Image: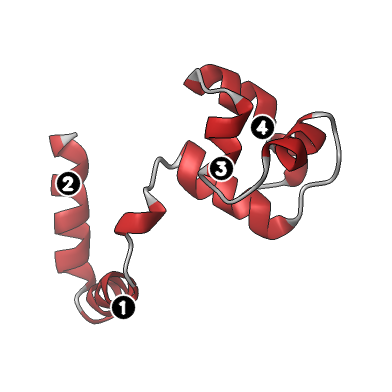
């Protein structure tokens, strides 16, 4: 996702969060977030954290390295099973 496509202020407003709530979820101070909302260039790691947390809706505290390894293993070694589980999980939402 390109930096130009991410509008942090619009995302924050859509989520109904104030700057402190929004930016603290990804480890950015309110003042730093305010600068990004005003047009300052956002570093790639911050963009990715914003995407994962606020666009994808993933709680970073719930992710473990073993979870990622398991998903990678399943996806690489058993792609049909991975696809089936993926489809079932998305149809349940």
* The disc label shown at residue 69, or none: 1
In the image, residue 90 above or below residue 8 = below
Question: Could you tell which of marks 3 and 2 lies nearer the N-terminus?
Answer: 3
- Which element is circle 1 on? helix
Q: Percent from the top left, x then y, of residue 10?
A: 64, 22
* The disc label shown at residue 8, or none: 4
Question: Could you tell which of marks 4 and 3 lies nearer the N-terminus?
Answer: 4
State the CA–CA distance, disc 4 to disc 2. Answer: 28 Å
Question: Could you tell which of marks 4 and 2 lies nearer the N-terminus?
Answer: 4
Q: Percent from the top left, x then y, of residue 19?
A: 62, 28
Residue in the image at 14% along x and 66% along y = 81
Q: Which residue is mark 2?
A: 89
Q: Nearer the viewer, residue 66 or 75?
A: 66
77 left or right of 26?
Answer: left
Binning the other alpha carbons within 10 Å of mark 4 as few (below 14), some (14 to 19) or many (20 upward) gives many
Closer mark to the observer between disc 2 and disc 1: 1
85 left or right of 56?
Answer: left
Residue in the image at 55% along x and 48% along y = 26
State the CA–CA distance, disc 2 to disc 1. Answer: 19 Å
- Which element is circle 2 on? helix
Tags 1 and 3 in contact by the CB under 8 Å rule? Answer: no
- Which element is circle 3 on? helix
Q: Percent from the top left, x then y, of residue 3?
A: 74, 44
State the CA–CA distance, disc 3 to disc 2. Answer: 29 Å
Binning the other alpha carbons within 10 Å of mark 2 as few (below 14), some (14 to 19) or many (20 upward) gives few
Tags 4 and 2 in contact by the CB under 8 Å rule? Answer: no
In the image, residue 91 above or below residue 1 = above
Tags 2 and 1 in contact by the CB under 8 Å rule? Answer: no
Q: Quadrant of the C terminus?
A: top left
76 left or right of 29?
Answer: left
């Amino acid at each position: 996702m390109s930096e130009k496509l991410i509008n942090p202020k619009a995302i924050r407003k859509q989520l109904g969060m104030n700057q402190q709530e929004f930016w603290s979820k990804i480890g950015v101070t309110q003042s730093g977030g305010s600068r990004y909302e005003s047009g300052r260039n956002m570093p790639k790691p911050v963009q990715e954290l914003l995407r994962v947390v606020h666009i994808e809706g993933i709680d970073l505290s719930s992710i473990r390295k073993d979870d990622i390894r398991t998903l990678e293993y399943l996806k690489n070694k058993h792609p049909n099973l991975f696809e089936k589980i993926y489809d079932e999980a998305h149809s349940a939402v």
